[in-house]
Image (spheres, rainbow, N blue to C red):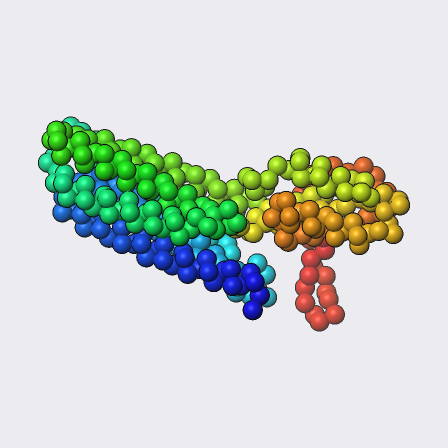
Amino acid sequence: MAPHHNSDQVVSRKLLLAIGLTVITLIAEIVGGFWTNSLALLSDAAHVFMDVFALSLSLLAIRFSARPATEQRTFGLHRLEILASLINGVTLLVIAVGISYAAFGRLLHPEAVKSREMFVIAIIGLVMNLLAARLLHQHHHDDLNVRSAYLHVLGDAAASVGVIIGGIIMLYTNWYVIDALVSIVIALMIIFGALRLLREAGHILLEGVPSHIDLPQLVARMQGIEGVASIHHLHLWSVCSHITFLAAHVELEPEGKERSLEILVALEELLERDYHIRYTTLQLECSRCEESPVLQAIGHRASAPVVCGHGMAGHQH
């Protein structure tokens, strides 16, 4: 069995455990929110829902990556992650608006909250979040997807701390307006997270350059390989949050023609080692073609059907 497959199984098991712990927190805060009449707990439950979703996406991404491509879907099902992110982002915005509306109502007309019970439930939520974060901590430096889920869990732990502080204040002061204030802060956190989710999903759908890659630096590093004269017709995009593709034309120095395979290997090693780009299409050119820009605009033009040997229609590019 391949080492990376064993690693995926270990991460999958830890993600499943983290999802289980987070679901316990979600159920506890929903039930506890209605029982204690705490809008802050219900708001934190919505924030926990973001964590459940993020953890589930991380797990599904690992499972989808093991599924083969098909003739209809050559990239497999990886883009399901982005579709789910869009739906989740819109849903969370609606939830956050609802929380904000209810919170402003309670600012004007505060309602009594069972502060002691709220405090206990928030403590349980914090413990569950910290346990989930501990499970993911070992892998969050190696996998961008797991890192995202890890940061989600830490964010919810911070929100739980806010609920706990609010519970303590209300327990000793009966100043129930704190419940509404904590809810508004959590709603703002949800809105920020949802907008970031929508922005990142939209960026991927628009074939944008991954945010963690400095494109000018990447091009300079590629051109720094001995034997490379220039890079042009470069395209860099993500299929989902953890799979990046690069395609480019590589103009070689005249003396580099005899070392083309060596140069190709050096470029691929650079891209995978320093930028985590495992999927590359590099066209080596030794023709000293006229100067071309690094980034080449893609235009639309009419296509005429071409009759192939098997009677199928193709397109002329």
Identify the residue at horizontal 42%, vertical 51% (top origin): 136
The picture places residue 59, in percent across and down from the top left corner, at: 43, 57
Quadrant of res 274: top right
Can you see residue 283? no
Q: Is residue 35 left or right of residue 162?
A: left
Q: Looking at the rendering, in which quadrant would you find the N terminus? A: bottom right
Can you see residue 172? yes
Using the image as rendered, state which of residue 301 and residue 76 is in the foreground. 76
Identify the residue at horizontal 34%, vertical 50% (top origin): 131
Q: Is residue 182 left or right of residue 16?
A: left
Quadrant of res 122: top left
The picture places residue 97, in percent across and down from the top left corner, at: 29, 37
Using the image as rendered, state which of residue 160 and residue 55 is in the foreground. 160
Using the image as rendered, state which of residue 135 and residue 268 is in the foreground. 135
Give the vertical position of 248 relative to 60 (above or below).
above
Identify the residue at horizontal 15%, vertical 33% (top origin): 170
The picture places residue 138, in percent across and down from the top left corner, at: 46, 50
Using the image as rendered, state which of residue 224 and residue 295 is in the foreground. 224
Give the vertical position of 111 relative to 69 (above or below).
above
The picture places residue 45, in percent across and down from the top left corner, at: 27, 46
